[in-house]
Amino acid sequence: MEKRPTALILGAGIMGLCTAWSLLREGFSVRIVDQAPPPNPRGSSVDHHRLIRHAYGAQPGYMRMVDEAYAAWDELWADLGEVLHIQTGVLALDEANGEWLRASRDALRAENRPLEDLSAAQVAQRFPYISGEGIANAFFCPQGGVLLAERIVTALAQHVVAQGAVIEIARASALDAERATLTLEDGSTRSADVLVVAAGPWIPRLLPAIGRRVTASRQVLVRLAPPPETAEAWSCAPMVLDLAGGFYLVPPVAGTPLKIGDHSFSLQGDPDDPDRTPDLHEADRILDLARRRIPGLDRFTHLGAATCFYEVEPRERFVVERLSKRGWVMSGFSGHGFKFGAVLGQRLARAITQPEASHGVTAWAAGDEMISA
Ligand SMILES: Cc1cc2nc3c(=O)[nH]c(=O)nc-3n(C[C@H](O)[C@H](O)[C@H](O)COP(=O)(O)OP(=O)(O)OC[C@H]3O[C@@H](n4cnc5c(N)ncnc54)[C@H](O)[C@@H]3O)c2cc1C
């Protein structure tokens, strides 16, 4: 009987798990190593939700990738037997004619994607829980929504194990990409035909060369429950991208809290720091960003603040690259990678199984261009 090819994946976050899912479908025998059982709440992938949207500023490569991302998620939902995405639409607004909104609108219009321009009065009328004050520029896209991240990671980990993958709980202390080998902290080694390193914000420890290109970045988010009189309206709200305030808001869908965060990078912090608790001042800073836009924010119930880590590439471009003939790395997701987890896993698996297809995957993942399916 022909021997199955083997893959060793470091990291059971969304990237490692989606690559495992795709390689299993290609007939690989898969071992995943992670320092914690999935869902690891200290990983970048694990929180109630992550957003998926086409609006992408001046990065049309990523805007186009979102179509492929949706198609890949649909394949995953079929395998998982449940859809873990809630469509909410996207409300993007600014108090000036800022570059991000303008570039997003131009790119969306150039490809005839559904998009509605809104005045300040229309925003306030249509979404009465949001203040129109100061809005100079806004649009609504019906496409886009919330990926139920923690539930996805949990279900996907169970699925890959049911398909024969092994998830080993151990911390890797070193790797050898040439030999597709991991050394674990107990000194033992694991090897396979191919190694994929998807270690999220911990990657600089194991791959200093990648660590010179990406920086771990501690980010703070705040979870809230709206007061009873607006709770129902908020549960059907769109995601909000407020460029003037500098915050994003995830509506409370499918039993999750409402969440507010910002996308400005701290470029500081250590993902191994045992104390991840933000101080009150950090939570207040996030709430201050949203106060003008959300009337009565002080009457929302504070459900807690949390920290999570991005690994930031200076131009926010993903790093999906060959480390050697037998090794690959997935990194640089810069706080916008989750939405592409399923399609990145598929594309990397294809690059591994069809070396002739491997050529374009790095540029495609960096948002440069399309490669044909
Ligand atoms: C607050 C926040 C909001 C975000 N919002 C969005 C959003 O709205 N939309 C979007 O698309 N993206 C978003 N992102 C980004 C997205 O979540 C990440 O890009 C994605 O989850 C990265 O997944 P990953 O698998 O690379 O990393 P991780 O989920 O961090 O997985 C890496 C895994 O590797 C393991 N590991 C690392 N080192 C070792 C080692 N030495 N030994 C053993 N195991 C190890 C870790 O334990 C971890 O489980 C957000 C991120 C954060 C933090």
Image: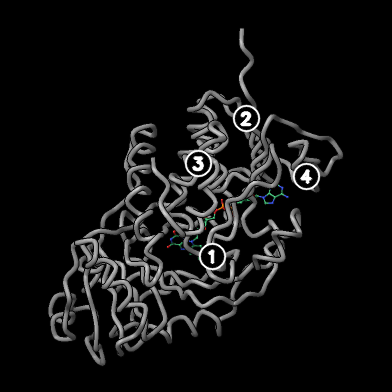
Q: Look at 39% across and 38% down and name the residue there.
A: 76
Q: Position of residue 215 (x, y in %)?
A: 65, 68
Q: Residues within 10 Å of mark 1 (few under 14, many from 20)?
A: many
Q: Relative to 131, is 167 above or below? A: above
Q: Position of residue 243 (x, y in %)?
A: 37, 81
Q: Earlier in the sequence, mark 3 or mark 2?
A: 3
Q: CA distance from mark 3 to mark 2?
A: 14 Å
Q: Look at 72% across and 60% down and name the residue there.
A: 204
Q: Residues within 10 Å of mark 2 (few under 14, many from 20)?
A: some
Is the residue indicated by label 2 positioned so its CB lies within 8 Å of ligand 1? no
Q: Relative to 109, is 286 above or below? A: below
Q: CA distance from mark 4 to mark 1?
A: 23 Å
Q: Look at 42% across and 85% down and name the residue there.
A: 289
In this figure, which residue is indicated by the disc labeled 1?
A: 334
Please give left or right for residue 362 compared with residue 144 in the image: right
User: Where residue 175 is drawn, which disc sits there?
Assistant: 4
Q: Earlier in the sequence, mark 1 or mark 2?
A: 2
Please give left or right for residue 220 compared with residue 83 in the image: right
Q: Earlier in the sequence, mark 4 or mark 1?
A: 4
Q: Amino acid at mark 4?
A: Leu
In this figure, which residue is indicated by the disc labeled 2?
A: 166
In this figure, which residue is indicated by the disc labeled 3?
A: 18
Can you tell me which quadrant of the image ligand 1 is in? Answer: bottom right
Q: CA distance from mark 4 to mark 2?
A: 19 Å
Q: Image quarter for residue 1? A: top right
